[in-house]
Each structure stands twice: as C-alpha cells, then as structure tokens.
Amino acid sequence: MSKKPLKICIISLDASPLFGFHEGKSFGGAEVELYLLGKYLAKRDDFKISFIVDDLGGASGPILRENITLHERLHSFCLPFLRLMRKINADIYVSSSSGKMVGKWALFAKLLGKKFAYLVASDIDCDGGIEKRMSFVDSLWYRLGLKLSDVIVAQNTHQRNLLDQRGYCRVVVVKKGLDGETGEIREDGREYLLWVGRCTESKRPEIFLDLARKFTQEKFLMVCPPSGESAEFFEKIHTEATTPPNLKFSAGEKYADMENVYKKAKLFVLTSDFEGDLPLVVLESFKYGVPVLSLTINPDGCFDDNRLGLFAGGDVKILEQQIKLLLADRALYLKYQNAGRKYFDDFYNMESIVLTFATLFREGLILLH
C-alpha cells in the first residue's frame, strides 16, 4: 500500500517572482533555496507541496504551478493568517524567515497541532546577531519561534554549534542544494567579473565598485536588487555604479536568466561580512565553472589552503592581488574551475539533498520527539 502523501506548506512570502508573479520584486538566496526544495519534493508521489507567498497578482484562489499549490497572503494580520494555515491543513509548515513572524507561525502551527521546521538562512540567525537588529518584543517572538520549532535545519556544523550553545537542541545539519544539470564547463564567452547579491551594507557592494575603478581593463557586472532594508543605501550604490565606464549595474534579473549571467563570468567576487553556509551565488558559480574569490567568509573552512577558491582573510589588498593572479595564471584558473564544480557535484546537488529532507520530514521529525 502506498504511503499517504505528506502535506508540506512552505511559507516564503517573497518567493512569488520565482513562480512568475511580480517578477520585478526582489528575492534572495533563502527564497531560491525554499523554491527548489518545494520543486523537488513536489516531483515525489509521497509529498504534497504548497506555498504561502505575498503576491499572486490578485488571484481569487489558490493557483497550481509546477505541481505546487500557491496561496496568496491577503492580510498581514495574525488571525487571517492563522485561518489560512488552518485551511491549508499541512502536516508540516516550513520557513526560513528570520523576523518576528517565525515565532507567530511556529505558534500557529502548535495551535493547529502541526509540526514546524525552521531553516537557518545565515550565521546571524544562530549567534544572536539578528536579534540585536530587532526591537525587544520582536526578538522575543523570534526566540519563541526557535524554541517552538520541531526541528531547526542548520547549513553547517558551525551554525549547529552556535545554536547548541544557546540551548537549541533539536538541530540537524542539511546542506542547501541546486539543480544539478550542469553539462560541460563553458570556456568561451567569459566576459566580466561578477558580483550578485541584495543591496545590503553587510554584503559590502562598495568594495566591488572600488575594484571596477582599479581594474579598468576588465569588465564588471553587478546584479544588485534592493533589499527593502535601506532604500537610501541602494540609491547610493546605484548612483556610484554609474561612474565606472567598465561596470554594468543591474537592479535585478529573472531567476531563469541567471544561468547565462554565470556562464559569461570570468570570476565571482564575494565581499559579504557574513552569510549562512556557502551562499547560493557561490554555489551557482561553482556549478558553472566560475572561480570564486572570497574576501571575508570561509564557512567550515572550505577555503582553507585555497582548495576551492582564493580567500583574502578580510584584506582587500590581498583580494586585488588574487584577482590579478587568477587572470594571469591559466593553469590556476582551470584548477579552481574544476575544484568548484567537483565540490558542487559532491555535496550540493539537489537530487541528493532532497532525499535527506524527505527522510527528515517523513521520519526525522518523529524521531526528534
């Protein structure tokens, strides 16, 4: 006898552009991660997947896309959202939001007698950093969400240790994943140095602008959609990006178009102060054979001894030297093309990642209690 499909509802309010709605709206790696998780689980007969998103273009009811049922959040108030969750009647609710709403959604799941899984998006979700950016009341809601979660999914052992130190014990480590249909690494048509990320101060986009001013003989592409955190900071970066003649600035690309963006990149430059595990933009670079240079982050020591890419240890001068080195040394360039691709294939292919999540959702949540 076949198993009854397990109903999973993923709450990802900013994910509507990934389903073809409100495509000008900004989204980030957390939304892509949840979209891919839902997409791959929806291919299985033993799961029934739904999403709650912010914008379905005013649809009068649920919409089916990619075998996923999409529900629009019509109100931000608590009671209508609780009613929507009750109507969906999922077995497990999943989110990676790091705001106060994670506490309310986890509480609603408990009131409905359902499970709640929280997927960590960044290191600051684990070490208390995100709570320092919230009001006192909002931080209490966030901590309640962590406490009420039936499972917290960290992306690496460092995050799990941070959560363990703060008393959160129901933590498992599962890597994020990407579509694994990679094909041959493209050698021709590499045009520019690439930076991709939401326009937040923690991602330090101004460093990439400085690099464009110094490497005037190279082309630079910056895909930098606004984040919603600071319109003023976005306008500042956008204005400064008009100055270097060798830099092209994009305020956002469709997710489906990003494959060609990566395939044309010579190098990918990561300037963030912090991330979660390796951010999806780095995994995309590995997938398409784009060597990566990381200024500051080195999750689980993956850049130790420069085995996957070049790590500058937070020093911009070293980063500049490393760019010169990779552009000049063809053998070293090819080494990092192949090392990144192999690492992606070995650890981040979504086909294998989804099996881990399927086991966690169907069996692990029971074993953890």
Image: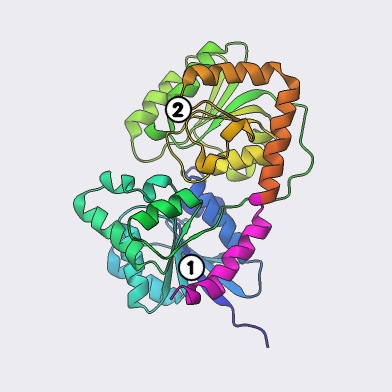
Amino acid carrying mark 1 in the image? Cys
Are the two marked residues, 1 and 2, in contact with CB atoms closer than 8 angstroms?
A: no
Q: Give residue 188's quadrant in the image.
A: top right
How many numbered dots are placed on residues in this image? 2
Q: Is residue 182 left or right of residue 129?
A: right
Report the magenta residues as a range: 347-369
Residue 132 horizontal/vertical position (percent): 26, 45
* Mark 1, other Cα within 10 Å: few <14 / some 14–19 / many ≥20: many
Q: Is residue 22 visible?
A: no
The three-letter amino acid code for the residue at tag 2 is Pro
* Place of residue 127 in the rendered image (x, y in percent of width and height, measured from the top left): 35, 48
Left or right of 261 on screen, residue 91: left
Q: In the image, is residue 352 part of the stretch drawn in magenta?
A: yes
The residue carrying mark 2 is 205
- Residue at 71 percent of width and 24 percent of height: 332
| Residue 39: quarter of image | bottom right
Q: Is residue 357 above or below residue 122?
A: below
Residue at (41, 21) in percent of width and height: 239
Q: Secondary structure at mark 1?
A: strand
Residue 90 on image: x %, y %: 47, 74
The crowd level at tag 2 (other Cα within 10 Å; few <14, some 14-19, many 20+) is many
**Which residue is at a point 70% across and 48% down the rendered structure image?**
345
Q: Which residue is mark 1?
A: 9
**Rendered residue at 79%/40% (across/down):** 184
